[in-house]
Amino acid sequence: MQKAVQDCYPDELSHCYGCGRNNAAGHQIKTYWNGDKGEGIAHFTPGPEHTAIPGFVYGGLIASLVDCHGTGTAAGAAYQAAGREPGSLPALRFVTGSLQVSYLAPTPQGVELELRGAPVEIKEKKVVVDVTVSANGKVTAKGQVIAVRMPDTMAPK
């Protein structure tokens, strides 16, 4: 079984509410990098606490999923571009420089969501990722994340 990109982050950089494995209260989103297709794939099933209107998912959750899946996809793409394995040091950890989300249709509650991230620009310190969110095979949201290499000032001391 392939490891998720987020599971390759060092422990001290794994506390994010959206994707940190060390945050038991968070979403713990898992992005799997498919280097052959050049994309990141994640799945997430919203719980009843993610309700906007009964039967539909809260838009803030969708934005959070796009955000963390975008930065995870950026890390996967950056490792591949550098010819390195995810988790090799120094860590390639990305944070959000910009997040844009368009809601195309209501996202139904109670179904697994599929997120696909496609890098459209890969540079040493910046990766731009287009993300789609689908429910039951229908795209309900699209987003773009400009992910930037985590500045040294954010590293735990």
Image (cartoon, helix red, strand yellow):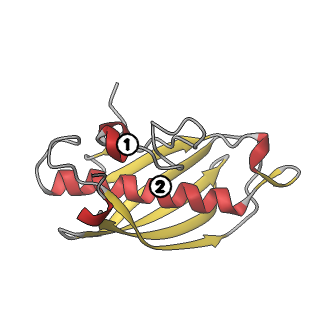
Of mark 1 and mark 2, the one earlier in the sequence is 1
Q: Which residue is mark 1?
A: 6
- Answer yes or no: is residue 151 visible: no
Residue 110: x and y in percent read: 76, 40
Q: Quadrant of residue 154?
A: bottom left
Q: Is residue 93 above or below residue 123?
A: above
Mark 2, Cα crowd under 10 Å, few <14 / some 14-19 / many 20+, is many
Residue 34: x and y in percent read: 32, 44
Quarter of the image with the N terminus in it: top left
Image side of residue 98 versus residue 55, left or right:
left
| Amino acid of disc 1 | Gln
- Answer yes or no: is residue 17 visible: yes
Q: Which residue is mark 2?
A: 68
Can you tell which mark lies on residue 153? none
Image side of residue 15 versus residue 151, left or right:
right
* Secondary structure of the residue carrying numbered label 1: helix
Q: Residue furthest top?
A: 1
For the point 32% across and 60% down, the residue is 94
Label 1 to label 2: alpha-carbon separation: 9 Å
Of residues 118 and 60, the one nearer the viewer is 60
Mark 1, Cα crowd under 10 Å, few <14 / some 14-19 / many 20+, is many
| Amino acid of disc 2 | Cys
* Secondary structure of the residue carrying numbered label 2: helix
Of residues 131 and 138, the one nearer the viewer is 131
For the point 12% across and 55% down, the residue is 82
Q: Quadrant of residue 43?
A: top right
Q: Dots 1 and 2: beta carbons under 8 Å?
A: yes
Q: Residue furthest right?
A: 54
